[in-house]
Every structure is written in C-alpha cells, then in structure tokens.
Amino acid sequence: MKILYAYPTLLRVGFAAALAYRAELIIWMLTTTMPLVSLALWSAVSREAPLGRFGPREFVGYFLAALVVRQITGSWLIWELNYEIRQGTLSQRLLKPIHPLWVYSASNLAALPLRAGLCIPIAVIAIFNASFTQNFSLLAIFILSLVGAWCINFFAMTLIGSLAFYLESATSVFELWLITFMMLSGYVVPLELFPGWARNVAQVLPFRYTLGFPVEVVTGLLDVHVATHQLAVQWVWAAGIAIAGILAFRAGVRRFGAFGG
Amino acid sequence: MRTAVTVRALTKIYQVHERPAGLVAALRSVLRRQTKAVVAVSDLSFSIEHGERVGFLGPNGAGKTTTLKTLSGLLHPTSGEVFVADYVPQRRHPDFLRSITLVMGQKQQLIWDLPPAETFDQNRAIYGIPKNTFAQTLGELDTMLDIGSIANKPTRQLSLGERMKCELAAALLHRPSILFLDEPTIGLDVSMQLVVRDFIRSYNEKRGATVLLTSHDMDDVASLCPRVIIIDHGKLKYDGSLDKLVKTLRQDKRIVLTFTDPPDRASLDKLGTVVDFGPGRAVLGVPQTNLRDAIGHLFTLTGIHDLTVEDPPLEEVMRDLFAQSKEQDDRAS
C-alpha cells in the first residue's frame, strides 16, 4: 500500500506545519474550552445537592474528560475544504496520486502532539481531583471510542465541507451541526441530566458518540456491557458517515469547476 | 503507445449563476436562481506526439486553462473524448497522475509557511519516489534551476522568481512525461523568464517529455514551441508550425535599422510602412516581394549602421488571426 509509505512523511510535514501555525492552533484550542465554563457552573450548582449521580467531583471528572476528548478528536477540515473548493486550490491536491482525504487526515492527526501538550496538565489535574474508571475493558473501549469519535468528526466535516461543491459556502451548514452538537453531545450538560425523551433522541444521533459517549466510558458512568453495545453503535455511525463523506466528496469532485485554481 | 495527448470533439460547458445588480434582483435570485450555459470549449480536436513542445495560444477566456484542466483530469468534459498517456484523465488513475504535471503560474503547491524542501519531501512520499531517485532528481533540478540555496528558506520569504523555480522543481520531482504549463513565466522578470524557458527546453530534451504550454508572452512560445495550437471562443483556429502561421498570415517582413545619422523619413516611407522611428533606430514593414529592392535601397543611404530582417512580432500575427476569426464569426452569425 503506497499510502503506508507516504503517511509517516505526511504526518511529519503536517507536524511541521502545525508548529508553524502554533499561535493559530493555540487560539483555536482556547475556543474549545467551553467545558471549563460548564464545569464552573455545574460544580457550583451541585455543591448544594448532587444532581443524579453527579456531585462536584463527578462534574470535575466529566468536564475535564470532555475537554481532553474534544481536543484530541476535533477536526477543522470543514474550514480547509470550504476554502480550497471555493478558491479552486483543491486542484493541487487532486493532481496528486493519493486521495486528498489521506493528506487532510494526516494534517489533522499531526496536530495531535501539540494538542496533547495542552491536555496533559488538564489530565493530571483531573486524575487528582476526580475518579475515573480503573476497569481495563472500559479503558480499552475508551481508546477505541476516541478513534470512533475522531472518525465521526473528520468524516462529518468531509460530508459538510463537500457541500461547498454545491453551495456558495458550507460553513453555515456547519453552524447547524455545531449548535446541534452543543446540545446533544453532552458538551455543555451531561446527557444523563436531560429528560428521558431528549436522552433517547441523543442516543440515536451521532453527536453523543463524538464526545459524551467516550467521556461517560472513562468516567465509569457506563458498565462494560452497555459501553460495548454503544461502541458498536458508534462505529456503525463512523462507518456510515465515512462512506457518506467519501461519496459526497467524490460526487463533488465531478462537478468541481476548479475556478481560479 | 498512442499519442501523448488525443483530444476528440471536446466540449466543456459551465453552468454559471448570474443575476443583475440590486436588491430586487438579489431577493429574486433567492427564490429562483438564474443560470446560464457558458461554452468554454467547443468541438475541439487535436493530438500531440510524445516529446513535442506545443504552444497553446488564445486570448483571455478562449478556453486554454479549461482545456489544460480537462487534460489533467481536474474537469470532466461535457462531451467528447480525451486521452492523455493512454488514460482517460477524469478517472484520475494514480499512474496517470504520476505521468503528468500541471504547473499554474498563478497558483502554487508549495506550503506557504514551510521551506520548499518540505514540499519536495512530501511529494517524494506522495509519489512514492525511492530516496536515491529523489536525491538524484533533486540534484539534477538543482543543477538546472539553482535552488539549493533557497530550498530551506520559508516559501513566504522567497521572491516570485525563486518561488517559480521551486514550483517547477516540486512539480517535476516525480519525472512526469507530460507537462501542462499554464503561464509559467507570468510576473517574472526577463532574466528569470530566460531561466524558466531554458529549463523547460532542457527538461524536454533530456527526458523526451511532452510539453503543452500556454503563455501570454509570445517570446516564450517563439523560443520554445515549433508548433502552436490556437483557440478562440473555445474553437480551434490554427494547428501547425509557428513559421507557417506567420508566413500565411503576414506577407511582410520587418527591417530593423540602426543608424548613426538618421535617414530622411520620407525616403523610408517610399519603401514600406514605418512602424517605428526613433533616435538611432527605425523599424520598417516591407512586403516580402519588395524586400530585395528595399534592402538594396537602404544600403545606398548614408549613416546606416546595421540592418536586420525579421518576421513581424508574434503578438501582431496573433492579433491579425483573432481579427480574421472575429470577422468570420460575425459573417457567419
């Protein structure tokens, strides 16, 4: 597989680019610190009385885990795709004998070490101030769920970004995705605190599987049986969105005007 | 193997959104979007043999870039057939993409904030070039383009000429056999234009590569391309040798005089059309049939320092061709 030969270099160059854009990356990372606001709010509320299974310590664990999961599974491909399709600069990627999504994915993953740099102190704080699962099976499911969450995010951004082949701009559609993500992923409020019907809606949509699910696994809110079942659901979502994203990109390339590019 | 490039009855039509200016038109376009079919290329056919250097000419909007993008697989033809290196470009087979390159003078593939060396290495990985072949090719490109001293500076800090040299290197690392060059010398100063021209010629000669070049600079075309394909409004207007085109369209020659003592302008007027008359230099347009007599007469004048006979500038030849083609179109419509 030629991609196996190319990928380490793509990651290395992607890392060099991430270092060159480190200021932008840090600012972008700071915009994803919403869980800290939620943490302050919900910790204060739960000091009066626990909310379901959530006391202050549980909220610390949940939202610091949410911050870490968001940092290492996020994708900003939508902005790149939207720009490159509109400006025609996608042409340069299409001229290469490797699918552009491989190169985009390497560029996304290459920024992980930098993002992990921010996550390490948060993870250390979280470990000392909250309780996380010690169960080996749940920890393994957590790792797999991070991969699944990254895939859903990356390919959802591919799918939405590919709309730029058809629309003036795909970023407004992304805003819709983002708002729904905020409400139904467990990013702002743990889904366990939602009314039953809202939880049921969240269970069947992909948003929870990009954040709430891995966080619930690592904080021990799910048992192994439920977590395994939901991991399967997450991976079905990941596969479905990946197929949809790749097909949407392929269909878009057929009508790509390459204007200006 | 068939020809390097075969184009048969290629037509490319874009659906372009359009609306008049103003608020009402803007609101109306929300409800009902008007589109217009724009024919960029129409029934275009030509073929290019392996190793040829061909100039692809036409005025702005003639369909040159659309054709190059179709040949490189970026655009899907509306109708017609295209084969490049025996592949159908729009299928974008990896082996096809390894056999071609498209250099666009106004767009770049270099990573803006990293040194070109990083883009070179990325291309090495993407094209699966073995490390020793990569080092050898890069060495050859360095010899031809002298990029060694600039390859490790961030791209954003390079001059336009330095960037273009690195762009060419990045585009040719995988040793493509077919080069589509869209305005590769645009914006470059004269000395850098010469460097790029020499490079294209030597790459073509060394590797036997096929070159299809568009350029607004007719000197590029005259010095590089024995054959030209000319299109206007997406249609083929001429396909043949540059010499033949000039001879067919223009029966006159240019006599360039340099002098220490200016000749009488009226005496030059009698010999032909005075195109330029300045201190120390004059250019005279003379019909081919009168050339011998005119030269004979000019030698009798005092103060003439030097005399050369040239073809009319290619820009003028092209202008005549497009004017002729416009007249034909007007008559037809």
Image (spheres, helix red, strand yellow):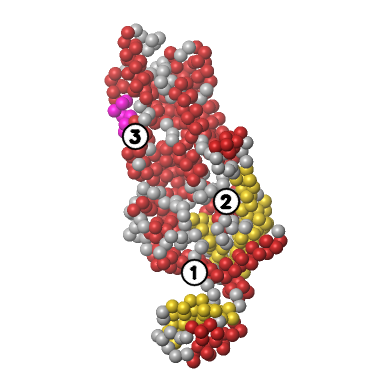
**What residue sits 39% from the left and 45% below the top?**
A13
Q: Residue at x 57, y 36 (%)?
A: B24
Q: Are marks 1 and 3 in contact (CB under 8 Å)?
A: no
Q: Which residue is mark 3?
A: A27
Q: Does the image show residue B135?
A: no
Task: Please state the horizontal and vertical placement of residue B271, each as a whole percent of the image.
Answer: 55, 84
Q: Secondary structure at mark 2?
A: loop
Disc 1 to disc 2: CB gap under 8 Å: no
Q: Amino acid at mark 3?
A: Ile
Chain ID of residue with mark 2: B
Crowding around mark 2 (Cα neighbors within 10 Å: few <14, some 14 to 19, many 20+) is many
User: Please, what is the dominant secondary structure of the magenta stretch?
Assistant: helix
Which mark, residue B219? 1
The residue drawn where x is 54% and y is 75% is B312
User: Along the line of sight, which residue is nearer the eye, B28 or B117?
Assistant: B28
On the image, the x and y values in percent for residue B187 come to 43, 60
Amino acid on which the number 1 mark rests in the picture: Asp
Task: Indicate the secondary structure of the residue bearing disc 1.
Answer: helix
Residue at the front extreme, as displayed: B266
Please tell me the numbered disc located at residue A129: none
Task: Report the chain holding disc 3.
Answer: A
Q: Which residues are magenta?
A: A117-123
Q: Image point 63% across, 74% down: which residue?
A: B248
Separation (CA) of disc 2 from disc 3: 38 Å
Q: Is residue A202 visible?
A: yes
State if disc 3 and disc 2 touch (CB < 8 Å). no
Q: Earlier in the sequence, mark 1 or mark 2?
A: 2
Along the horizontal axis of the image, is B325 left or right of A242? right
- Residue holding disc 2: B73
